[in-house]
Amino acid sequence: MRRHTIALSALIALAALSTALTPAGPALAATRLGECPTGALCLWERSGFGGARQLYELSGTDIESCIPLRAGTTAQSLANRTGRPVTTYQSAECQETGEFETYPGSGTWSPQSPYRVRAFKIWES
């Protein structure tokens, strides 16, 4: 009986702690991670979602085409909320000879890219 009491107490404490850590739910987490609307790809010039943000929506972006960032800009953090996979590239031409990484579209926040992002592709699925 004592073992069950200890386990129950631990569960109650864990539930109280998780409630205290997330009082505002998903909205608070998104604010800390970087603001990016649903259906968009957001890229920030500095790590930790800092600096200028570039926002790309599906309605204005060719699917499965190489999209270079604006001339003279790079990104070091990103959020993919497009609902589709996105591949970022170190190369401005989306060449796979440099670094590249694919991020799922289900709501992925990356505070630090392993390289400076210069282009991306949004995939159909």
Image (tube, rainbow, N blue to C red):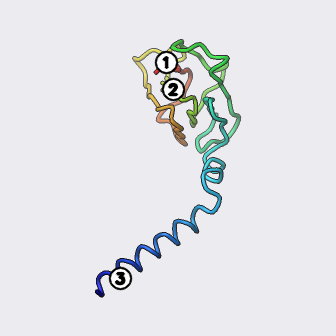
| Sequence-earlier tag: 1 or 2 | 2
Q: Which residue is mark 2?
A: 84
Mark 1 residue element: loop
Q: Position of residue 8 (x, y in %)?
A: 39, 78
Asked if residue 68 is positioned above or below residue 31 in the image, the reply reads above
Q: Count residues near mark 2 (Cα–Cα under 10 Å), then give few for <14, some for 14-19, many for 20+.
A: many
Q: Is the N terminus in the top left, top right, bottom left or bottom right quadrant?
A: bottom left
Q: Position of residue 94 (x, y in %)?
A: 49, 16
For image coordinates 56% across by 66% down, the residue present is 19
Left or right of 64: which side holds 54?
right
How many numbered marks have been drawn onto this rendered protein structure? 3
Q: Quadrant of residue 77?
A: top right
For image coordinates 55% across by 20% down, the residue present is 119
Q: CA distance from mark 1 to mark 3?
A: 51 Å
Asked if residue 60 is positioned above or below residue 117 in the image, the reply reads above
For image coordinates 59% across by 17% down, the residue present is 68
Give, as a three-letter code, the residue at label 1: Glu
Mark 2 residue element: loop
| Sequence-earlier tag: 2 or 3 | 3
Whether residues under marks 2 and 3 lie with C-beta atoms below 8 angstroms apart, the answer is: no
Q: Which residue is mark 1?
A: 124
Whether residues under marks 1 and 3 lie with C-beta atoms below 8 angstroms apart, the answer is: no
Out of 125 and 62, give the one closest to the viewer.
125
